């Protein structure tokens, strides 16, 4: 195993405002409050929908899907993202570099698509109040398709994310990039960046 000799940290090589200890303390507290509130809130929603004898309906399926997606984001993405922002290096296993991006993108897509489906369901209910367009089994199938589509769209993030090491800077870094070798890969990269980031931030 090759031992790297480095003396420059990313903080001294390229200082940023989030290196300041006071700012880190403030944002750590905010992250913690959001993290706890999101976990408690979404867990309670799932508990009520599952164990509190709530009648199974189209609405409960979609709300449960939304809560589950947000809970996954809080459990697997938010803590790792916070630590990476404050340390500015990748301190986790290399496989996490690929998985975190997929979880982040996947949960955002799932939440966006679920909210869209809820809006469409409400619209149909207003326009055709006496007609049941989406029943319970169909709602479950729609949720399955939402998760499949959401994480399929997020897969390129995992594919293009990898650990990077620089000779002049200590530490490892998780980056989303592509080595442009030919015109085809360049086009694929630009299509991926344009569609993914536009779809993701529509949320």
Image (spheres, rainbow, N blue to C red):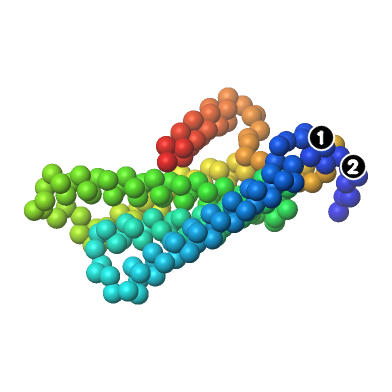
Q: Is 156 or 13 nearer to us in this picture?
A: 13
Answer with the quarter of the image where residue 63 lies.
Answer: bottom left
Q: Position of residue 117 (x, y in %)?
A: 29, 48
**Residue 175 appears in the picture as rendered:** yes
Q: Secondary structure at mark 1?
A: helix
In the shown orientation, is residue 54 left or right of residue 133? right
Could you classify mark 2 by the number of other residues whose Cα lies within 10 Å: few (under 14), some (14-19), or many (20 or more)? few
Q: Secondary structure at mark 2?
A: loop
Disc tally is 2
The quadrant in which the N terminus is found is bottom right
Q: Residue at x 46, y 44 (%)?
A: 153
Q: Residue at x 55, y 43 (%)?
A: 157
Find disc 2 in the rendering and name its residue.
Answer: 7
Q: Residue at x 42, y 37 (%)?
A: 202
Q: Is 99 or 13 nearer to us in this picture?
A: 13
The quadrant in which the C terminus is found is top left
Find disc 1 in the rendering and name its residue.
Answer: 13
Q: Are marks 1 and 2 in contact (CB under 8 Å)?
A: no
In the shown orientation, is residue 6 left or right of residue 101? right
Q: Position of residue 158 (x, y in %)?
A: 57, 47
Answer with the quarter of the image where residue 144 lies.
Answer: bottom left
Location of residue 150 with respect to 189 vertically, above or below: below
Q: Position of residue 64 (x, y in %)?
A: 36, 61
Q: Position of residue 177 (x, y in %)?
A: 63, 36
Q: Residue at x 29, y 62 (%)?
A: 60
């Amino acid at each position: 195993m090759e031992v790297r000799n480095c003396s420059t940290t990313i903080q001294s090589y390229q200082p940023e405002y989030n290196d300041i200890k006071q700012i880190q303390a403030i944002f750590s507290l905010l992250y913690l409050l959001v993290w706890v509130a999101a976990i408690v809130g979404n867990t309670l929603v799932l508990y009520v929908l599952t164990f509190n004898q709530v009648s199974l309906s189209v609405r409960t399926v979609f709300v449960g899907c939304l809560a589950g997606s947000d809970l996954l984001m809080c459990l697997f993405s938010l803590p790792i993202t916070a630590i990476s922002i404050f340390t500015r290096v990748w301190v986790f296993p290399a496989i996490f570099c690929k998985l975190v991006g997929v979880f982040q993108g996947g949960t955002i897509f799932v939440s966006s698509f679920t909210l869209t489906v809820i809006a469409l369901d409400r619209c149909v209910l207003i326009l055709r109040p006496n007609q049941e367009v989406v029943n319970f089994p169909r709602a479950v199938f729609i949720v399955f398709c939402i998760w499949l589509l959401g994480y399929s769209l997020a897969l390129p993030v995992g594919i293009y994310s990898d650990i990077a090491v620089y000779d002049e800077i200590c530490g490892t870094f998780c980056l989303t990039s592509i080595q442009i070798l030919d015109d085809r890969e360049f086009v694929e990269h630009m299509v991926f960046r344009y569609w993914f980031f536009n779809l993701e931030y529509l949320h």
